[in-house]
Image (cartoon, rainbow, N blue to C red):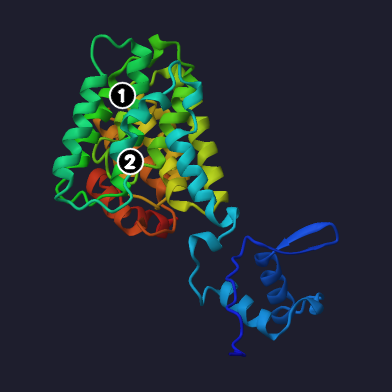
């Protein structure tokens, strides 16, 4: 029996080779983008696309057709967000006196989840994770190993939190306890380079999405000394610029907010105004905290200066003016009108 049915078309995905032209390999994504550039945006490569290719290119490039993971190019998968988040979780480990990676492997089987973890299941998973940490920790561990162990646990906890419903707070509570233990370890006696320590902590701070440090944001800088101030400040400012350039405004803003927490933790009150000027009215919490710190030092003029520095157009400007009036009795809006 003769059949005139067309053979089934084998699906092809964006990263796959389309053709080799001018000594370069062209993926299907290269083809689709060029077709759109030519046909829709007055490019000059008109010979590239026929009607079928043009239709498919428009579907893919405009997002009208959803993309499977295997249809994505490495650049589409390894976005700046993904790269910077992974760097914050694991990127500084090789510079630790003892590598946290070997301890992370001891947690991997518990935190690598193929399926989403329901809130109820966290009651069985979290105790296993806690027992593993307790078994690995203890007096037999030297300080560099304890630092590495608890650093690895921090990232392991983040991996589990990504894959779970923590409505009951089981993961958060365990992570919070381990986080305080980690911050209490005297990293200086391990021989760890201060710049490495602060780079790692600052990146963790701005990529901390689960409220671990709620009402305790200054705890990240608990071990900071006056001599660390310039190092940490430069790290936070560099992170703000790097993340802003990648259009990651939330961690960029948090890097600036962390400046306020650093200065308060180290009593660097002479830098409050600079931080307030950088933060502006994006956020009220760090501005209020610095103003209250000045008031607690009996420096009302300093508190007003902080508020004035932050009095810039933005989302929280009206609230900050009310807060300044309540804290200091100074009406910033009236001052600007008179000025």
Q: Is residue 116 left or right of residue 173?
A: right
Q: Residue at x 16, y 34 (%)?
A: 127
Q: Is residue 299 visible?
A: no
- Residue 197, relative to residue 124: is it above or below? above
Q: Is residue 142 left or right of residue 243?
A: left
Image quadrant in which the C terminus is located: bottom left
- The location of residue 212, given as percent across then percent down, is 27, 39
Q: Which residue is mark 2?
A: 158
Q: Which residue is mark 1?
A: 183
Q: Residue at x 22, y 49 (%)?
A: 326
Place residue 101 in its image quadrant. Answer: top left
- The location of residue 142, given as percent across then percent down, is 33, 10
- The location of residue 23, given as percent across then percent down, is 84, 57
Which of these two is toward me, 325 or 71? 71
Q: Is residue 107 left or right of residue 174?
A: right
N-term mark: 1 or 2: 2
- For label 2, count other residues whose C-alpha is less than 10 Å away and answer few (under 14), some (14-19) or many (20+): some
Which of these two is toward me, 87 or 35? 35
Image quadrant in which the N terminus is located: bottom right
Q: Nearer the viewer, mark 1 or mark 2?
A: 2
Place residue 257 in its image quadrant. Answer: top left
- Residue 229, relative to residue 169: is it above or below? above
- Residue 284, relative to residue 198: is it above or below? below
Q: Residue at x 45, y 26 (%)?
A: 198
Which of these two is toward me, 314 or 222? 222
Q: Is residue 155 visible?
A: yes
């Amino acid at each position: 029996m003769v059949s005139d049915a067309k053979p089934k078309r084998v699906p092809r995905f964006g990263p796959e080779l389309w053709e080799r032209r001018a000594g370069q390999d062209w993926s299907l994504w290269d083809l689709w983008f060029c077709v759109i550039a030519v046909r829709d945006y007055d490019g000059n490569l008109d010979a590239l696309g026929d009607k079928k290719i043009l239709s498919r290119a428009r579907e893919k490039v405009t997002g009208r057709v959803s993309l499977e993971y295997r249809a994505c190019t490495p650049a589409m998968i390894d976005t700046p967000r993904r790269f910077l988040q992974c760097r914050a979780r694991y990127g500084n480990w090789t510079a630790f006196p003892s590598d946290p990676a070997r301890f992370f492997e001891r947690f991997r089987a518990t935190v690598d989840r193929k399926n989403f973890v329901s809130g109820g299941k966290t009651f069985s998973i979290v105790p296993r994770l806690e027992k593993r940490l307790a078994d690995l920790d203890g007096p037999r561990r030297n300080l560099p190993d304890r630092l590495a162990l608890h650093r690895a646990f921090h990232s392991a906890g983040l991996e589990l939190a990504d894959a779970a419903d923590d409505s009951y707070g089981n993961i958060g509570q365990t992570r919070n306890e381990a986080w305080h233990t980690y911050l209490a370890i005297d990293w200086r006696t391990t021989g760890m380079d201060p710049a490495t320590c602060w780079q790692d902590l600052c990146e963790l701070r701005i990529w901390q999405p689960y409220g671990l440090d709620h009402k305790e944001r200054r705890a990240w800088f608990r071990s900071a000394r006056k001599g660390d101030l310039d190092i940490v400040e430069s790290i936070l400012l560099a992170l703000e610029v790097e993340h802003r350039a990648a259009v990651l405004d939330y961690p960029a803003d948090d890097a600036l907010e962390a400046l306020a927490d650093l200065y308060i933790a180290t009593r660097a009150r002479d830098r409050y105004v600079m931080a307030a000027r950088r933060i502006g009215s994006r956020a009220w919490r760090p501005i209020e905290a610095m103003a209250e710190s000045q008031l607690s030092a009996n420096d009302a003029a300093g508190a007003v200066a902080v508020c004035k520095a932050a009095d810039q157009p933005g989302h929280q400007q009206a609230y900050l003016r009310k807060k300044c009036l309540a804290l200091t009795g100074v009406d910033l809006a009236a001052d600007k009108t008179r000025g």
